[in-house]
Amino acid sequence: MKKRMFIGIDIGGTNMRAALIDKQGKILQLNKIPTDNAAGAENASKRLVETCRSLVQKSPEWGGNVVGIGMGVAGKINAKEGLVVFSPNIPCMRNYPLGIELEEGLSIPVVMENDANVFGIGENWIGAGHALDNWVGLTLGTGVGGCLILEGRLWEGDHLGFAAELGHIIVQPGGPLCNCGLRGCLEAHASGRALMQGVEEAVEQGALSNGPLFEKWQRNALNPKVIYECALQEDPTALKLFNRMGWALGLAIANLFTALGIRHAIIGGGVSASWDLFVGPLRESLANHSSFLSPEEMVILRSSLQDDAALVGAAKLAMDLTV
Amino acid sequence: MKKRMFIGIDIGGTNMRAALIDKQGKILQLNKIPTDNAAGAENASKRLVETCRSLVQKSPEWGGNVVGIGMGVAGKINAKEGLVVFSPNIPCMRNYPLGIELEEGLSIPVVMENDANVFGIGENWIGAGHALDNWVGLTLGTGVGGCLILEGRLWEGDHLGFAAELGHIIVQPGGPLCNCGLRGCLEAHASGRALMQGVEEAVEQGALSNGPLFEKWQRNALNPKVIYECALQEDPTALKLFNRMGWALGLAIANLFTALGIRHAIIGGGVSASWDLFVGPLRESLANHSSFLSPEEMVILRSSLQDDAALVGAAKLAMDLTV
């Protein structure tokens, strides 16, 4: 009998990645194709079906058979209807039936989830959270995604179409404007976008007017990685932004630990590559804002699956729904 | 066969209340005795045993038999050891084996819980939360207590000796000093103590120097109820304090709804008698700090059991553990 295998998909603004994954969570083959928003949703959907079909065709070589597909999307989805409702990073896909097209194109069941939730499912299964009952997950990217694993399972709340939107916890009332329209959200302090906006504001206020960071800004060559490199070279504006990121993360996590009576958090996402710069201020803020736990009791872990967390989590989601 | 009955106990700084309660949660008889800190813990414990014994002796008149005792304590407890560890309002009971003495004195099993948690158990059983799966509970008293009911059960987190300490969520970093030593906690805005401190500060800063509120302060006759009455008479200092209370409650509840993906909260405790003064600002703040739910979707309920919630919840706790 052939082994049951799965395809895990991670849909991002720049790339779409699809992987053939076995039931231990091992990635057997990974395909990466550009999202290419300019070419439109239909084009992207067709190419995604094609790349998944090639994985399905490959599976016999591994002694397997693809029985389910899981997809994580950075944005709001309607899992029941197989829709990408709205994704800020994939503007072409407003109310687009990506899940349906994939399912019909391949005749294999497809499940969809928010990208921070598949991160949580992946880390919970075979990542940094595998031995933990209860933890808070944060993904630092263009925005800040969140998930809660409670009693070993992804927490889904009242099934309101969102849960654990930890990026929109308000850490500083009246603070910096967030993409969601409110002020002072965690995301407005601890995301790639917050770093970029922080530099813009420093220039506007005259606090940044020379040096490598300013030059990059002038040449329109700024991105979170550049800001990170400038901070490593001790640019005071860049350092301040990573300190603020750590402060906000520490405060948000402290509040979540106090509210939930738990003590573990796992941080992932592309911007968490700047770990060494924000984790010090994070731990300091966590200690300063906790009245029930000592610093030693509180455990902040880095994602162990890194880029693969969403792929693996999406595959696990498909696995659990096709038993 | 005799009906199984329970005693629910609520230990507060001023009074100890004990009630004979049937398995539908009906209070058959309620005894109230002063806590009398000055007379010491041993004296209080002896009198509590006596009043419970009288309830045990009364139970046959109701056709019942007391098989379990539940006790809610405003403070930190060690349920396993039957200890009151520390209660700010019952200073005489530091590390006092109140649970053990009760159990030995009556030869009936005793369980203990934090008072906000028994409030949650009571409201969840036959109160405002009885039809809800997921909700946030807040008790406004001298301090602010909290509980979380998730999937119909009291959430206990990682069993760290606390959970849902919602009074110590930080809503205003660097804000007013809290009894816990941190700044900007919900409790430092939304408790009886916060109202009292708010008046003190207004006097110190010269913002309050005449009128009925000032006169009460001068005569050392201030308490939360007096501040409430002055607010009803439109004293600007008192009104400002209830506005601040509502603002902080709204922000904290918004953050909890965002983090948990839920939409119901239940508020109780003595200071919630000032409901009409803080609920307007609360709803406004809730709307202003929520990015995922509309004001219509968010439901703020008042405790329906009021003073009885803790008694009933304590009895339910005993019931569940003596099945």
Image (spheres, coloured by chain):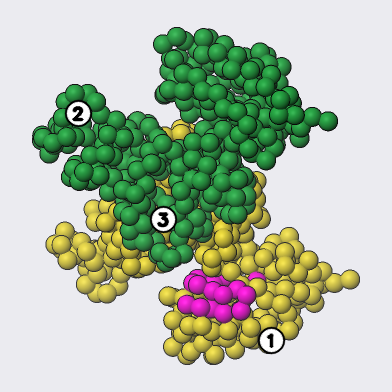
Chain colours: A yellow, B green
Measure the C-alpha gap from mark 1 to mark 2. Answer: 74 Å
**Residue A268 visible in the snapshot:** no
Q: Position of residue A139 (x, y in %)?
A: 48, 59
Closest to the camera, between mark 2 and mark 3, is 2
In this rendering, the answer to whether A168 lies above or below B127 is below
**In the displayed structure, does residue B227 sit left or right of residue A270?**
left
In this rendering, the answer to whether A250 lies above or below A229 is above
Mark 2 lies on residue: B217
Closest to the camera, between mark 3 and mark 1, is 3
Q: Who's the residue at 85% across and 72% down the image?
A: A2
Q: Amino acid at mark 2?
A: Trp
Q: Who's the residue at 80% across and 72% down the image?
A: A64
Label 1 marks which chain's residue?
Answer: A
- Residue in the foreground of this view, choosing between A48 and B313: B313
Q: Who's the residue at 48% across and 83% down the image?
A: A94
Q: Amino acid at mark 3?
A: Ala
Magenta-drawn segment: A70-86
Q: Bin the neighbour count of mark 2 within 10 Å (Cα to Cα): few under 14, some 14-19, many 20 and up.
A: many
Mark 1 lies on residue: A104
Q: Position of residue A298 (x, y in %)?
A: 49, 39
For residue A69, what is the image quadrant? bottom right
**In the displayed structure, does residue A76 sit left or right of residue B211?**
right
**In the displayed structure, does residue A58 sit left or right of residue A269?**
right
- Mark closest to the chain's N terminus, 2 or 3: 2
Mark 3 lies on residue: B254
Label 3 marks which chain's residue?
Answer: B
